[in-house]
Every structure is written in structure tokens, then in C-alpha cells.
Amino acid sequence: MKTNPSLNRSLTTLLCAATASLLILSQPAQAGYMVTLQQIGSNVVATGSGAIDLTGLSFDFTGAFDPHITGSAAFILTGPTPGVSIDTYTGFTGPTSFGSGLGTFASSGSGDTVGIAGFIGFIAVRHGYVSGNALSDSSFYNNATLSSLGVTPGIYEWTWGTGANQNFTLDAVALAVPDSGSTFGLLLVALGGLFGVSHLRRVHVA
């Protein structure tokens, strides 16, 4: 049976790339606090997790804000709606914008309240937060896109030291995610299709 060397090389390259992607996906999230902002179906979802080491930051004030995004001011606050009492801290460095948006409030949310205001210059955590404790939250922006929210896709980071939890990262993902399924499942489907094409081509040239 004849084979197609060029096709074999292409399949080998794709398999290597797929394996590398799976390895990246299986790696643990980086230390510190990270909020991922991505399109899921017709909505934009902000999902945050991690811990924040307040060492090196200075307490600013206690107040309350509703979760929202303002790209032009590098402001993203994730958590339950309506907003709850938060403590704010200053003393970090990082981007002062991550888009052109002038402000959109979240449709709903849950978990801890955590945020960053890069232009104004404060980090927000739930009132009474103990430095280093785990944080987890989410906010939903219904019938929205990153573009309509005025967010430029990319990775933005704010830091205030060299410790493992002395950073706040926003990952605004450019690609949309389907309502159902997983990255792994979609990858298997794609690879299955490639193997099918390979088989058909081999039969054809046999």
C-alpha cells in the first residue's frame, strides 16, 4: 500500500502540536490571582481564582462597588451582585487600561469580590479578607462580547513584589468558547477528522 510522505509529516506535526496543547492545558494555574474573561456562547464570563498576598500594599479605604468592567481605566471587579463591602489597597504597578470601554455592569455574579483599578490605583478584596487565603468568583455579562464591553484581548498583569501571590492577572481570551463540550473533546474531534482524511487518502492512492 502506498503512503503519502507529505501527509504523514503533516499528521505528525499536528499530533505533536496537539500533545503540546494538552500538556499546557494540564499545567496548574500560575500563582497569584487570575481572572479569565472570555466569550461563552452569547455571554462574556469573568472567572477568577487564586490568592493575594497583601504584603507591600497599603490599606486605602472600605467601600462598596457593583461588579463591572471599564477597559479604559483598567477596572474589573468580579463577584456577587449587588456589590458587597470591600477593602482596597494601593502600591502596585501595571497597565492603566485594557481597552476603550467606559463601563458595563455585570448581569449577575457569585463568590468572593475581587478587583483591580489600574488607572485609579487600587486592588479590591472582600471586606475582612485575610492575606494569602484562596479566592474564587465569577461574573456574567449577558448578550455581550469583548468588543461590546470595550476590552482588548490580551494578558495584563499588575505586581507589587516578587512573592508567589503578589500579582493580579487578567487574561482576556480572544477566542469564543462553545456553550457545551470541552477543549479536550474538540481536540479529539479534530484529530479524529484528520485521521479519517488520512485513511481515505491512503485508500485512494493504494
Image (cartoon, rainbow, N blue to C red):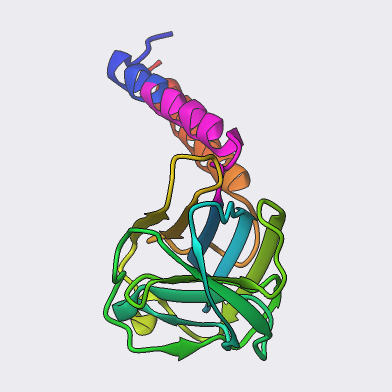
Percent position (x, y) of residue 159? 41, 52
- Secondary structure mainly formed by the magenta segment: helix
Residue 199's place in the image compared with 105, above or below, is above
Choose top left, top right, bottom left or bottom right for residue 3: top left
One can see residue 204 in this view: no
Choose top left, top right, bottom left or bottom right for residue 131: bottom right
Q: Closest to the observer: 78 or 158?
A: 158
Residue 28's place in the image compared with 114, above or below, is above
In the image, is 18 to the left or to the right of 66?
A: left
At x 54%, y 74%, the residue is 88
One can see residue 47 in this view: yes
Percent position (x, y) of residue 164? 54, 40
In the image, is 68 to the left or to the right of 79?
A: left
Q: Closest to the observer: 179 or 130?
A: 130
In the rendered image, residue 21 lying in the magenta stretch gets the answer yes
Q: Quadrant of the C terminus?
A: top left
At x 33%, y 89%, the residue is 102
Percent position (x, y) of residue 144? 46, 83
In the rendered image, residue 26 lying in the magenta stretch gets the answer yes
Residue range of the region highlighted in magenta in the rendering? 13-32
In the image, is 122 to the left or to the right of 67?
A: left
At x 60%, y 42%, the residue is 184
Percent position (x, y) of residue 192? 55, 36
